Image (cartoon, rainbow, N blue to C red):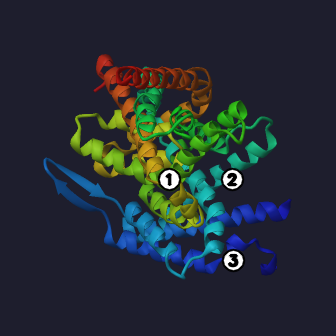
Amino acid sequence: MTRHVRDMVLAFVVAGLVIAVGNWVGYETVPTEALPGLLLVIGISLAGVGVQKVLPGNIPTVLYVAVIAIVLSLPVTPGSTQMIAWADAIDVQAITTPLLAYVAIGVGSSLADFAKLGWKSVIVGSGVFLGTFLGSALIAEVVLRLQGVV
Amino acid sequence: MLSRLPDHLKDWRLHAAILAIVLIAEFIGPLSLSIGPGMLPILPMIYAFLLGIALLFTPVVNERQSKNAQPITNAIILILVAKVSLNIGPALDIIVQVGPAILLQEIGNLGTVLIGLPLALLLGAKREAIGMTFSIAREGSLAIINDKFGFDSPETRGVFSVYLFGSIFGAVIFGMMASVLAAFTPLDPLALAMAGGVGSASMMAASSSSLSALYPEMAGEIQSLASAGMILSIATGFFMAIFIALPMAERMYGLLTRKRSRATAEEEDVRE
């Protein structure tokens, strides 16, 4: 159990190091400045994993992580402005760039499986994604305009 | 001590490769392609993805690295969700204000069925089309289809194929769609931000970071709406899929295939 926790923490440390380097090179934030924000988001993630393990039901971990982050960022939470300022030192792109690098390498053998599915799946898959995205965006746009928000 | 570490933490080749990719991608930085009236930004994450795929064809990475990439990927996804969700608190007023839009845009998910299903049938898919197009095919959808039609069914094969496609290309496609639609359509960045929430966490992150790069002054609002949209999609998507989208896909399949078989039957009549 403790070893499991340690390995989990270490996976986040590896992720954090890569993010810190990208944030430094691409967004000119020195790692010492990004450190509090990184520790915060890693802490929230670990808390989410812990809560998911403890609570019953098969609710996705991302939902717990999001809820914890939201609660911490509420104006009524003491120190919320400080925490948000720490997190702001990390550019979201400094996280998405290594994410997509890991995703690409993680594809590995499924690339062969995917090749077997053929071009039809690529076209239908693209249609599905475009349909969902565009459908949602259009409805959101119409409602926002009706409300006079945009 | 070190020998007891799991392989994904000891895989120095993997982490060195990732670090090299990140350095190259961030060093190049974002590029802008001007196409017609708009500027299409190509972000470092896009090169990072392409460089990673390219490495798969070299001896630098093999099966071991691909397997070991998974646990770190999961960690980064959680970090991303924590990061973007920290924008929600200060933006609560805006989220309450646009609440109706976030709720209603869930209906936009049905665009999947309306566009995808006819397309799949046109390309010759049969019942696979139902699994392929009733949802955006994330984990929850696999469970629903598997439960209803069984593992060895055409519907399950369909949902798996789009799931696999999404796992590989989902984030990249969402990032590109957000950039393209922001640059070339009058859609508001806030509407696009919400739409980015319909898929997985990495898809949401990719689309919201594309939008944040285009509208840096709105980055906080964009990320908070994307995250709120994603949370709502997770909470409602499951029920939406079971009670509305899946029945709709089945009915539409019935309708389209009946019409088609009647049309072919009539053609045969004429020939006779």
B79 displayed left or right of B32: right
Disc 2 packing (10 Å; few <14; some 14–19; many ≥20): many
Q: Amino acid at mark 3?
A: Lys
Is residue B209 visible from the viewing direction of this image?
A: no
The N terminus of chain B sits in image quarter: bottom right
Q: Residue furthest top?
A: A146
Q: Amino acid at mark 2?
A: Leu
Are the residues under marks 3 and 2 on the same chain? Answer: no
Q: Is residue B264 above or below residue B185?
A: above
* Chain of residue at mark 1: A
Helix, strand or loop under label 1: helix
Toward the viewer: A55 or B170?
A: B170
Q: Which residue is mark 1?
A: A87
Q: Position of residue B2 (x, y in %)?
A: 77, 80
The C terminus of chain B sits in image quarter: top left
Toward the viewer: A106 or A43?
A: A106
Which numbered tag is attached to residue B10?
3
* Chain of residue at mark 2: A
Q: Which residue is mark 2?
A: A46
Q: Is residue B230 above or below residue B83?
A: above
Helix, strand or loop under label 2: helix
Are the residues under marks 1 and 2 on the same chain? Answer: yes
Q: Position of residue B19 (x, y in %)?
A: 50, 74
Which residue is at 50% across, 35% downward? B133
Which residue is at 49% across, 59% downward? A95
Residue A113 location, quadrant: bottom right
A134 displayed left or right of B133: left
Q: Position of residue A128 (x, y in %)?
A: 44, 39
Q: Nearer the viewer's eye, disc 1 or disc 2?
A: 2
Which residue is at 54% across, 58% downward? A116
Q: CA distance from mark 3 to mark 1?
A: 28 Å
